[in-house]
Structure formats: structure tokens, C-alpha cells
């Protein structure tokens, strides 16, 4: 499927993303005011650019950890079956945690990850997603913060891939088959 030729139409510019990331960081600082340490958990691989920019904007004592959950494989459609491919290295019991996701689509991934991490009894667990496609939702979940709500389009860039390609694009674009 990824062999079909396609072009990428710009949707959200790098400058717009940077401004939004800065604003979100200010809100996160307020939400976790007084916290001794914030553990920022990135969901691999799509969140790696977002988390890199986000943590550099947050003026707090931060630790970074990663998890990998699979739901998409190499296609454009969620499998709705979430598997944990890589778990956190550190403990989160009693800690302040922020889960960072690239896109909330059907919602299966975020719902599964939040359920799993909540079972470890963090002191506070909140979620942030760069993008949200609300019209695609199949399970009841919403990130505490969303960068941008977008329509039902397949997007790439700023860490997000199509069959592992286009993650290095500095902006968000939508895939259009030609
Ligand atoms: P969900 O479990 O259906 O919410 O899927 C969320 C995951 O699907 C995201 O973390 C992405 O990895 C992937 N995904 C959803 N929409 C897109 C897209 O438009 N482009 C690339 N990956 C996507
Ligand atoms: Mg993902």
C-alpha cells in the first residue's frame, strides 16, 4: 500500500507547532506546580520529535522514559489490538507522570496505555497528544491536552510516519495518493 505514489500536502507548519508546544508547556507547568519531579513518558516511535521539543520548553525537574505500543503495523488502519512492545525502564508508583502521544485516532492505544500505567498507582497521571482526530474515536478517551484537532486525514511528519517514512518532515502534512 505504501508503494502507491503519494504527495504530502502541508497541514500544520513547523512555526505553528512550535508556538503551540510553548503554550502547552506553560499549561503543563501550571498543572504540575509544586511537583518535585515529572516523569515524561513518550510513546514510541511517533512521539519522539514532539517529546523532544516539549521537554525543552518545560521548566521543571524532568525525567524521560519511553514505552512502545503497537496498533497500526505498517498500514493506515488501526488493528484495535494493543500490544506493549517495550515497557518503561523506571518505576512510576507515587510519581507525577505525563504520557505523550503523537495522535489519538480510534483511542485504543491511549486507553490501553493509561489503564496499564494507572494500575501502577502514580501520584498523578495526565496525557497530552499532539494531534486528535475526534471523528475517528471508537473508545471513550480524550487526552488532557491536545495540540491540534484535525479531520479524518492520514498525516505524516514531525515524528509521525507512513510505513516508517516521512518522520523527519519538520511540519505536519497529509498524505494524498496520486
Ligand atoms: P489509535 O489506537 O487508533 O488511537 O491509534 C493511535 C496510533 O495510530 C498513533 O499513535 C499513531 O501511531 C497511529 N496513527 C493514527 N493516525 C495516524 C496518521 O494519520 N498517520 C500516522 N499514524 C497514525
Ligand atoms: Mg503511535
Image (cartoon, rainbow, N blue to C red):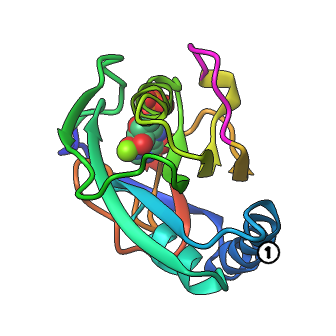
* Residue 18 percent across, percent down from the top left: 67, 80
Q: Position of residue 61 (x, y in %)?
A: 56, 81
Location of residue 124 in the rendering, given as x and y in whole percent from the top left corner: 62, 47
Residue 177 makes an appearance in the image:
no
Q: Is residue 55 above or below residue 112?
A: below
Between 74 and 53, which is closer to the camera in this rendering? 53
Q: Which residues are magenta?
A: 137-143
Instruction: Examine the structure image and report whether residue 48 is included in the region drawn in magenta.
Output: no
Q: Residue at x 64, y 84 (%)?
A: 57
Residue depicted at x 39% and y 29% = 116
How many marks on residues?
1
Relative to residue 117, is residue 55 drawn left or right?
A: right
Residue wearing tag 1? 26
49, 36: nearer the viewer = 36
Q: Is residue 137 above or below residue 46?
A: above
Q: Residue at x 28, y 39 (%)?
A: 69
The reply to whether residue 133 is in sight is yes
Identify the element where label 1 is drawn: helix
Q: Is residue 3 above or below residue 32?
A: above
Tell me: 35 left or right of 108: right
Amino acid at each position: 500500500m505504501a508503494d502507491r505514489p503519494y504527495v504530502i500536502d502541508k497541514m500544520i507548519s513547523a512555526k505553528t507547532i512550535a508556538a503551540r508546544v510553548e503554550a502547552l508547556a506553560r499549561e503543563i507547568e501550571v498543572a504540575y506546580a509544586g511537583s518535585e519531579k515529572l516523569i515524561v513518558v513518550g510513546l514510541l516511535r511517533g512521539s519522539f520529535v514532539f517529546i523532544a521539543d516539549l521537554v525543552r520548553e518545560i521548566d521543571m525537574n524532568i525525567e524521560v522514559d519511553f514505552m512502545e505500543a503497537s496498533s497500526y503495523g505498517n498500514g493506515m488502519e488501526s488493528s484495535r489490538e494493543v500490544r506493549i512492545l517495550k515497557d518503561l525502564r523506571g518505576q512510576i508508583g507515587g510519581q507525577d507522570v505525563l504520557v505523550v502521544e503523537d495522535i489519538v485516532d480510534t483511542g485504543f492505544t491511549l486507553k490501553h496505555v493509561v489503564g496499564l500505567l494507572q494500575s501502577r498507582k502514580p501520584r498523578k497521571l495526565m496525557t497530552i497528544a499532539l494531534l486528535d482526530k475526534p471523528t475517528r474515536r471508537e473508545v471513550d478517551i480524550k487526552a488532557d491536552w491536545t495540540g491540534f484537532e484535525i479531520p479524518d486525514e492520514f498525516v505524516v511528519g514531525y515524528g509521525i510516519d507512513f510505513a516508517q517514512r516521512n518522520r523527519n518532515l519538520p511540519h505536519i502534512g497529509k498524505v494524498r495518493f496520486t
